[in-house]
Image: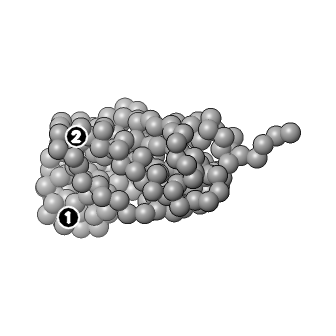
Amino acid sequence: MTTAPLPVILASSSPRRRELLEQAGLSFQVQSRQIDETPLDGESPLDLATRLAKAKAEVVARLQPEASLILGADTIVVLGDTILGKPSDAQDAIATLTLLSGKQHQVITAFAVTCSPEATLWSVRSVHTDVYFQDLDQERIERYVRTGEPMDKAGSYGIQGLGGALVERIEGSYSNVVGLPIVEVLECLARMGGPQL
């Protein structure tokens, strides 16, 4: 007798993560809770992304009465040792894109899958993608920022939108830069008793 796959809950309000899972044909629910995303003293970008991905999954898992797979994720944009978060305003977005112009940076997504409600069984992974920006003049940066697209995105750009035109090339997972390394996530969910796609 075949056991039915466990239902999947995405512990994220990100529309980009939701779209990636929908495009992959996955059936899931969305539930998210706010957590404190302040980096700890001396915390590396990878450790920060991993800790936040686990925290997002755990807080939702504790609220589920039925057995489910809870997926939490966190994406961080890093230039050298500097974490580039979401811009506070247009000037901040311009400053970030000026920093990224003509350089290579890294996008790190950590994701964590746990079983509710106990949240004792975990699978945690991270995926890194190198992104190379074109040389951008100030006018082009300001024109892009005026579109409003950068304002809710780590690193002040969206590769899946107009920001894709700023990118010269990437090395690694494209969907990771969007917000979720979809191949690795689907493999993990299937391995832990979720749907087989």
Upstream in the sequence, badge 1 or badge 2? 2
Q: Residues at badges 1 and 2 in contact (C-beta under 8 Å)?
A: no
Q: Give the quarter of the figure containing the N terminus.
A: top right
User: What x and y, as percent, mark residue 97?
Assistant: 19, 52
Residue positioned 36% across, 49% down in the render: 52
Q: Which of the 4 image quarters holds residue 89?
A: bottom left
Q: Amino acid at mark 2?
A: Glu
Outermost residue on the top side: it is: 171
Number of residues whose C-alpha sits closer than 10 Å to that of mark 2, classed few (under 14), some (14–19) or many (20 or more): few
- Seen in the picture, residue 177 relative to 129 is either above or below; the reply is below
Residue positioned 26% across, 58% down in the render: 86
Residue at disc 2, secondary structure: loop
Q: Amino acid at mark 1?
A: Ser
Which of discs 1 and 2 lies nearer the camera? The answer is 2
Mark 2 = which residue? Answer: 43
Residue positioned 17% across, 39% down in the render: 42
- Seen in the picture, residue 147 relative to 109 is either above or below; the reply is below
> Residue 88 shows which numbered tag?
1
